[in-house]
Amino acid sequence: MAVTNWLIDKSAYTRLVASPDAQAWVERIERGLVRMSTVTRLQIGYSFRNGPQARSESGAPPLALMPLEYLTPAAEDRAVDVQLQLADRGLHRAPAIPDLLVAAVAEMAGLTVLALDTDFDLIAQVTGQAVERLRR
């Protein structure tokens, strides 16, 4: 039986505790099954009010328990390629740039995107990659 590993997007991260599946996600995070891209980490960091909050939350669960999945040149190239394929359909302005990068990181690493953001469903129409929506 294959074990699924996820790459969490900011849309899912910010609503994780409100999900009816919150406890299951906490357990998966504790088991190291949920990763985070540097793009998402930067988006979360942008939301902090000040340095003390940033340091406190960055060093505490759940954020501190999620291994980082780094951008690579191949992932950046893939994001550009997917954007071009979306442009062929007239949809290149639909997904946010961070979502293209997160999706590319997940695809290159063989991870399932965990999100609420519908941009990932659109991206998956081009890539065929796995996307799981966080239950609300």
Image (spheres, helix red, strand yellow):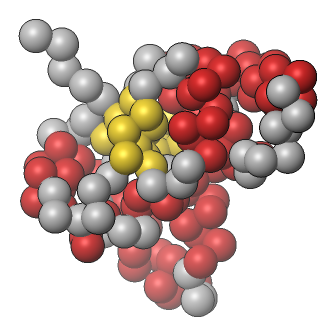
Quarter of image, res 100: top right
Residue 77 image offset from top left, x and y in percent = 80, 20
On-image quarter of the C terminus:
bottom left
Furthest residue to the top?
1
* Residue 28: x %, y % from top left: 18, 44
**Nearest to the observer: residue 90 or residue 56:** 90
Which residue is rendered at x = 43% and y = 25% of the image?
130
Q: Residue at x 53, y 54 (%)?
A: 117
Where is residue 42 shown, x and y percent of the image? 63, 59
Query: Could you tell whether 126 is left or right of 18 in the image?
Result: right
The answer to whether residue 127 is above or below residue 27 is above
Asked if residue 23 is positioned above or below residue 78 in the image, the reply reads: below
Q: With 91 as the anchor, is 101 left or right in this view?
A: left
Say whether residue 59 is visible. no
At x 40%, y 61%, the residue is 13
Q: In this picture, is 56 found above or below 133? A: below
Marker count (numbered)? 0
Rendered image quadrant of residue 60: bottom left
The residue drawn where x is 10% and y is 10% is: 1
Q: Nearer the viewer, residue 104 or 64?
A: 104
* Residue 55 in view in this figure: yes
Rendered position, 34 above or below 13:
above
- Image-based side of 50 in relation to 116, left or right: right
Q: Position of residue 88 (x, y in %)?
A: 89, 22
